[in-house]
Structure formats: structure tokens, C-alpha cells
Image (cartoon, helix red, strand yellow):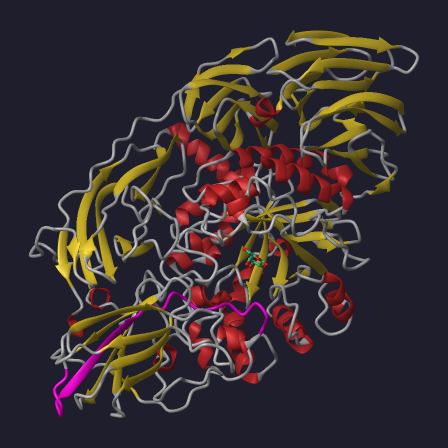
Amino acid sequence: MRLSRILLVLALVLAGGGLAGAPSVAAPRHRVGYDAHSVTVDGRRVLVQAAEFHYFRLPSPDLWRDILEKEKAAGFNAISVYFDWAFHSPAPGVYDFTGVRDVDRLLRTAEQAGLYVIARPGPYINAETSGGGFPAWLKLVPGRARSSAPGYTAAYRDWLGHLNPIIARHQVTRGGSVLLYNVENEYAVNTDAAYMQDLQDVARAAGIDVPITTNLCCDAGSWSSTWGSGPGAVQIPGVDDYPQSFDCGNAATVWGPWGAGLTERVRDDAPVFAAEYQAGAIDVNNAGYDACRELTGVAYTRFFQKGNLILSGATAFNYYMGFGGTNWGWLPQPNDVYTSYDYGAAITEARQLTAKYDEYKRQGYFLHAVAGSLTRTDPATAPSAAGLETAARANPADGAQFVLVRNPGTADVTSTLDWGMPDGHYLLPVTLTGHDAKVLVGGYALGGQRLVASTSEILTHETIGGRDVAVLYGNDGTPGTTILRYAAAPRVTVLAGRVTSAFDPAAGDLRLDYRHTGLARVLIQGAGRRPLLLLLGTDAAAASFWRADTAAGPVLVRGTDLLRSATAVAGAVALRADTAAAGPVEVFTAASAVTVDGDGVATRRTTSGSLLGHLPGPERVTLPALTGWRQHAETPEAAPGFDDSGWTIAGKTTSLSPFVPVTLPVLFSDEYGFHTGDVWYRGRFTATGAETAVDLNAITGKRGNYLVWLNGRYLGSAAGGVEADSDAPGNPRPGPGTFPVPAGLLDPGAPAVLSVLVQNMGHNDDWTAEDTRFRQPRGLVGARLDGSAAPITWRIQGTAKVDPVRGGLNTGGLYGERAGWTLPGHPDRDWPSATMTVPAGVTWLRTGFRLDLPAGQDTSVVLRFDGTPPAGYREIVYLNGWQLGQYGADLGPQTDFVLPAGLLRQAGANTLAVAVIATTPGTVATPHLAVAGVRRGGVPVRDVP
Ligand code: GAL
């Protein structure tokens, strides 16, 4: 390690990598409080700007830091995190918090990144995870889930008994990052106050002393009247809001079908908290996540989020999701999602930043800059502007005004803002494009300056090297006016761009008029204030800035594609930054030298007083072709002579499930301890020769099917039952399949074997706290012979054992999964070269490839299938034993599967294994490797053991 790097690392550790006042490694304990206006830390008001992050959807702990640094760089000061019970507990009493489950490390990483955490341990989390976070073994525990039933109570207390101590030691009150503790999730119907109270009592007993919140949905009002006081009431109720719906397929036309996106005030003594504010969508109509990103894109984010801040006065919000990630293994709840949980978020599943990220940054930096005023406001008289919506809030102490100006229509509107405020009355021209929104600021202390009013929005303002540097912005080509107040005419120097200025000595107003184009630079000096460098840019120019704090004050950086952190080291500023291409870098800093990722950068001073240098880009990456595939037929379970004597006998006649089996015995796979992935059944009967058909029912969850063999002959497949299927009278029996028995296949008096492979696509959630949903069985629920009353005796087989590293959700009960065909070390040399032609049933493909990706850069690699997903088969993909994707027409539109660094050996050998499950014989597609993004920089990523 070079000395400069050692110094950098040392400085980072000392600085805690965090913002002054935000949590850091060595930070002292803090007091957390709140009032009607905001959360406070040590009495200082905090505007909580959170992004939702699910560590369990990013199985490479070093990459947690990558995402958290990216959230921080967008201006967020917090993350909101669900903890998924099922992800940690494969069996009752068994808990794992190591490796990709090391939540202590996650919370430390948040501390190092300078981010607060809203901890959401459930027990119920929803989140489109299997069971909504409930481990499937909970189906066998008596007592209604999400109630104070004793069986459920004992189970969740065990979970929280393991998790709460970890959360407790990372609270802000103990020098850590956890700022708020969220019990339950959208607990709106079938509620039980004693249960809500117990969750809080259990947390308090474990030392949780930060404010407790919950995320309400649906009808916050009724919740508050029931729960506003008395048992179960929380201190800071939050409200979930998804104004854009999940209709990604109609992204171009959808505009607020689920309401105005205004967060309700639930308690008078607590701040308004948007616990989940829509920032993406689940892809319920298989439109693809780019469409979801469009549905919840820049226009939506500006119009709805800015509107909510001013109209509802929310001072705490959480964008759901900040980064969605991957439903690897059997993590997803199948009704709403498939492998990808990209969510159309601002940071893609492949960890790339999008245009939406730029908008988050514009808003995030603004909120960071004005938080001191904006966290204590009341509604105020709004200026008027014909053709536009307006609203205003004002801070009663400092008089600052925050004015929302929105264009509800789709056409551009040019208007005049008639704005009365403490500093005077102004008529200002404004132009808003369709569906755009601005938050304009007036009567505001902009560092050492007095901002009277501006029709440009504030990106940020910093005091750097004894002068103020402010960045203001507006849509490309639109007019802007900024008015500043001085005792006498200041000296105005336009360094770049076209800006006219006029000073009105009577009012003391310096008025600047301009059009937003590129980046204009104006230096304003004298008149008794410290110098101001005013940077006036377009939206794009604003998004090109990055800000970070150092012990020697803030820095602004332009030209990099990310700024991860900045540290003041002996007169120099050490940046950690990513670049997508070689190019200029400009740093506004008090320091006289710059290093980037440990390397010195030659710079010169500009007329703006900044340092200008040049940075290299990443090296080109070429990925190997995937060749040398080998193929192995599987499905031995279909053969009549297969030895199933070690399998579990499925002979139960009763079950805890509220679902009444179509036939006996009970064949629900959960009853026999098989909760995950594919399950095999073998049923024996004595043939009569009169059988005409096999009549089956199976429940797989959406996107699942089952395949049937009789005496080794493939009879066909059927779609499994879904969440909507129940045993209620009048409902069709779930997942029916009638399979005619081929003539001559069964000999009278001879033993016969039925083999059935049933996919379990994951468990329903429990959104409405009704056992009928969550406890819906998986596997066969009915089996009989048409034409014969002969009894069938059954054996069942599922997942072999829990993978100690990859956990209980990684594999199911396919023969190859049980025999380790997914694993890197499996000897496949004797497997024949792949023909890619497969029979109905299960076939495995394997190949290997070596990577030697350039060090010091972040290469995001995906496995890509070309064309639209095919029908007739599905492919389950394992990288180095980790199940990272399920591909096929029945499953969803996904064709790119992210291979996260850490699981992907970036320098070394990798193994791909693919289980093909074909319902009809055919030829299967093979994928290739592709690059989703390359940046110089990144974070060091070690191989996940
Ligand atoms: C919310 C829920 C989240 C997630 C989201 C949709 O209602 O609280 O857990 O399911 O909907 O993605």
C-alpha cells in the first residue's frame, strides 16, 4: 500500500467518513428527540432524507458500502432497512447473522458512510419477500400470525430476541446510526393492539430507546383514532404513499391515480413522516423495470415529492426503493415480483446511476442546504401565478419562505409570480414545463448573503475558503431572476455566461437576470458581505456537482461520475470518486492540492478560484465468451425403479393449515419440512388397468407449474394454483391438472409409480393479517385416479440441508441441487458436451469462465439472454453455487441477470450451472456475459467466501 493510500485510509477512519453531526464510528452518544416539526439529535433539528435499502437483496457485503456511499452522495442522510426474518431463520430456533446476513456489519457500514438508519425488523415486513418476511416454518406454528396468539408471540420474540440487541448497540444514542425503530408494517386490518404494544415493550426491554415508528397505510386516519393513544400507539407514526400506482405498462400516461401523494399528519405531537414514499414500482404487469423507472421518473419526483414537502410539511421521508436489488434464490413472493427487484429505482440493480438519481441529488442537496430553516415551518400565504399551482411555508423564527410552484398541466406555462415576503413585494417571471415543480426560496440567509428571492432553485450553498459558493439552477433555456440584498452596490463580475445585473439603492436589491444555459458564473464582492461565487446552471449543470464535507469544510466537485467522500489531509483534499470516462475535474476547495483515489492530480487555479485538473477513465473491459457447456440429463425420480426409500413418508391426515386438502393424505410440502423451491413426490398404487386419468391439484404460487410422470412416462404439466385460490366454497380447486393415462401403460395388478415435480415459487405474504393467505399450502393438495379407487401412498423429497453460507433460500429439492451440481467443485468433466436439446423434465448445463477484470475499477457484469424469454422451459441459474436468476416466459420479462462482484470472482475462475426445467422437449437458449457499466474507482470488493 502506498503511503498516500495509508494516509487516506487513516484519515477516513478518523473522520468516520461521515458528515459533521451525522453518526460515525467513534461518535459519542447522542440524544434523539422530536416534536411536532421534526426529529432532533442533541436538540438540533434533522430533516430525515432516507432511501430504502434491503441488504438481503445484495448478497455481497462489500457492495453494501458501494450503494450506501451512492445514497449518501445523492444527499440522503439515512437509509431505511427491513430485516427479513425468513432470510435469517431456516428453522425454528436457528438464526444466522454471518456473511451475507451480517447485519451488524451493515449497521457499521451505514455508520462509516455517515447515514442514519430507520430499522424495520417487522416481524412482518411485506416487501415482496417470500411470506412477507415470515419464515415458512411459521406456517406450522399455531396461532394467527400478526396477533398476540401465544405460538406466534413466542416465535417473533425469539426472532427479535436475536435481532434487537444488534440494533440496540447501533443506536444513535450509543454512538451508532439507528435513529428510528419501525414496528410491524402497514398493520391496518385485523389488528391487535396488545401485539403492537408487545413489539414495543420487547424492543424497549432490549434497550431500544430511539423513537418508535410504524408505517401506516390505506387509512391512516382510522389507525390514528384507534391507536393514536392507548395500547399499540407509536411515537412517530409514518404513512406510506404510492401515488403513481404500479402500472408500469402505462408509464407514459399515468399521473397520480392513487392520490395526490400528500402525507397525512397523524399525531399533533410528532412530525409528518412519509415512511414509504413511492420512488419506483413493482412490475406487476411485466412491463420491465425501465418502464417502472419512467412511471416514477424525474417529472413524477419533482411534482409529487416537492409538492409533498411544501403541502404536507413532511420533515422525514423514505424513498421506497433507493436501490432495489435482486430477489436471488427463493427470496421473492411470487405474486408481484420475479428475480429482479430493480424497482425502477434511481440506482439500478446493476448499481448504475440514472437520470432519476440526478433529480434526487438536486432535491437532496437542496434539502441538506435549507434543512435548518425547513425543519420548522408553518403554512404561509402563497404567491399567486396565473396557470400554476402555488403553496408556501415559512419559518416563523428566521422568516425564510419556501414556495411551491407547480404546473399541473402538460403544456409549458409562462407566468408572473406575485410574491409578497418580508423583504418586499416582487413580480417575477417564471416558466414551467408541463408537470414540473419548483421550490423557490425567499427571505433566506444564503450563507453570509441575504437571498431576497430567486426563480432559480437552490442546489446548494457552501462556505468554502472564506467565501460563499452557491449553485442555483433552472430548466435549460428558461429565464431566471435572483435578487440579493446589499447595503451598497457590490462589485459584480460575470466570469462566464450572460447575466445582467442592476442595483436598486433604495431597496438595496441587486437583481440578476439571465437564462439558464450551461453554467454561468458571477462573482459578487464588497458591500460588507463576504464574497459570493454564484453559479447559475441548467438542471444538467446542477446535477454535475457533487458535495462532501471534510474536517476543513465542504468541497464541491464537478466532472466525476460520483463523489464517494472527501477528506482534508494536510492542505490537500483527498477525494474518492468514480469516473466513467477521462475528462476534466473541477474542485471548489480551500485546499491547494487534490488527490483522487490516492493519486495526486495536477491542477491549476481557475478564475472562479477552483482547482482544475484532469482524471483518467476506466480501462476497457472484454469479457470471455461462454463456451464449453456440458450437459447432464436429470429427473431420475421419474423412473419406476428409483430408490426413494430415504424419502419422507407423506401420510398425515390432519394439518394446521386452514386449507382443506382436496384429497387425503395431506401432501402440503411445508407439513414435511420442505419449504423452499422444487419438491418431488412419488406415489405408489396398485393398478387395475381401468385408470383413465390422473387427477391432480397443486399450489405453486404464481409463475409455477408441475410436471407429472407415470411409470416413467411423461404425462405433461399444469400451472399450479395461486394466491387467489382457496378452498372456500365456490372457488375452483387450485391448480387442476387432468392427465389421461396412455393405453397399455398400466398392467392390472401391477405396482405403479406416479412421480410429480412441483415448483414452490415462494410463499404468499400476509398483508391483511389473515392466515388464509400466508398459510396457503405449497405442493400437491389433491391426487386421485379416475377410474380407480386404489389408494396412493406417498413419499416426498425437498431441499437436502441448509447451505451454511448461502442459506436456506438458495436451493430446492431438484436432484442436482441435492447432489451439489450447482457448486463450483462438482466434477462435471464426464458430462457430455451440451447439445442444448432437452427432453421434458430437468436437464443441467454447466460451464466455467475465468475473469481478470482491471483492478481499481468497478465493472458491473450481467448474464444476458438475447431475445424475449421463451415458453416451454425455464432456466434456474447458479453462479458459483448462488442462485441468481430464473429465466423463462412464464416467469417474467427479465433477460439480464446481475452477477454481483464478490459472488462473481473478478480475478479467477467462475462456475455457471443452469437447471433447465422443460415442460415440453426443445432447444434451450444460452446466455452470454455483458457489461452493465464500468467506472474507474468503486469500492474494493473481496470474494464472498
Ligand atoms: C408497501 C409495503 C412495502 C412494499 C411496497 C410495494 O405497501 O409496505 O413492503 O410491499 O408496498 O413495493
The answer to which quarter of the image holds residue 425 is top right
**Residue 287 placement (x, y as % from top left):** 46, 47
Could you tell me what secondary structure mostly forms the magenta stretch? loop
Stretch in magenta: 746-769
Return the residue found at the far right.
506
Magenta stretch encompasses residue 764: yes
The answer to whether residue 44 is left or right of residue 66 is right
Q: Residue at x 44, y 67 (%)?
A: 86
Q: Position of residue 436 (x, y in %)?
A: 67, 32
Residue at image location 30% in from the left, 54% down from the top: 871
Residue closest to the eye, 498 or 596: 498
Is 222 situated left or right of 287 in this image?
Answer: right
Write down the quadrant of residue 787 in the picture.
bottom left
Q: Is 736 positioned to the left or the right of 556 in the image?
A: left
Residue 492: where, in percent of width, then height? 74, 8
Which residue is more in the foreground, 797 or 70?
797
In this rendering, does residue 107 appear at all?
Answer: yes
Depth check: give the residue in front, 920 or 639.
920
Q: Which x, y percent locates residue 618?
A: 35, 26
Instruction: State whether residue 112 appears in this view.
Output: no
Depth check: give the residue in front, 20 or 76. 76
Q: How many marks?
A: 0
Does residue 468 sit above or below 396 in this rendering? above
Quadrant for ligand 1 reads bottom right
Give the residue drawn at x 24%, y 77%: 740
Residue at left offset 15%, top offset 71%: 636
Can you say whether 492 is above or below 573 in the image?
Answer: above
Q: Is residue 712 magenta?
A: no
Q: Quadrant of the N terminus?
A: top left
Considering only vertical position in the picture, is 52 above or below 808?
above
